[in-house]
Image (spheres, rainbow, N blue to C red):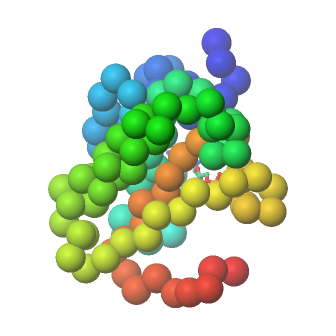
């Protein structure tokens, strides 16, 4: 079995509060939310990070972004606003080495981040 926790969530080997999924992507609640809405969207197929995603079909990358956009609309935060974060690598703050997009919303998000 994969050691990667997000691969294990993607294959339903590890429980998560799943919001939606299809053949390519899964959206689930972050275990330690930092905003009222804090969803993670992952490709089901393992990719370490955005930096490792060089061989990706651009259409697939586009579908992932549209997936997150539609999810935000479905959650009712498109009007109030939201933030997408893709922490990449050590200095980027990435702690789980499986590409994921954070969808954050539901409060005023400060800038710049820490
Ligand atoms: P990163 O710091 O890599 O950008 O974000 C990883 C995120 O995954 C963190 O916000 C963390 O709370 C979340 N996370 C880590 N382990 C689990 C888990 O087992 N289940 C869920 N749902 N989220 C997790
Ligand atoms: Zn993985």
Residue 58 percent across, percent down from the top left? 47, 38
Q: From what the image shows, is residue 35 above or below residue 52?
A: below
Q: Is residue 4 left or right of residue 35?
A: right
Q: From what the image shows, is residue 39 above or below residue 84?
A: above
Residue found 69% across the figure and 54% down from its top? 88
Q: From what the image shows, is residue 46 above or below residue 51?
A: above
- Nearest the viewer among 5 and 63 is 63
Q: Please state, as top left, top right, bottom left or bottom right, where the C terminus lies in the image.
A: bottom right
Q: Is residue 81 left or right of residue 38?
A: left
Residue found 50% across the figure and 52% down from its top? 101
Q: From what the image shows, is residue 75 above or below residue 100?
A: below
In terms of image quadrants, where is residue 64? Answer: top left
Q: How many marks?
A: 0
Residue 72 appears in the rendering: yes
Residue found 42% across the figure and 35% down from its top? 60
Q: Please state, as top left, top right, bottom left or bottom right, where the N terminus lies in the image.
A: top right
- Nearest the viewer among 100 and 5 is 100
Residue 28 appears in the rendering: no
Residue 41 percent across, percent down from the top left? 44, 45
Q: Is residue 46 left or right of residue 91?
A: left
Residue found 40% across the figure and 36% down from its top? 59
**Residue farthest to the top?**
1
**Residue farthest to the right?**
90
In terms of image quadrants, where is residue 98? Answer: top right
Residue 27 percent across, percent down from the top left? 38, 43
Residue 13 percent across, percent down from the top left? 50, 20
């Amino acid at each position: 079995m994969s050691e990667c926790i997000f691969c294990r969530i993607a294959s339903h080997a590890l429980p998560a509060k799943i919001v939606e999924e299809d053949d390519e992507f899964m959206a689930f609640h972050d275990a330690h939310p930092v905003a009222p809405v804090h969803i993670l969207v992952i490709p089901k197929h393992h990719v370490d990070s955005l930096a490792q995603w060089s061989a990706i079909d651009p259409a697939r990358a586009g579908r992932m972004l549209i997936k997150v956009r539609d999810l935000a609309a479905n959650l009712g935060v498109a009007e109030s606003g939201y933030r997408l974060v893709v922490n990449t690598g050590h200095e980027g703050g990435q702690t789980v080495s499986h590409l994921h997009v954070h969808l954050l919303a539901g409060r005023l998000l400060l800038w710049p981040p820490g």
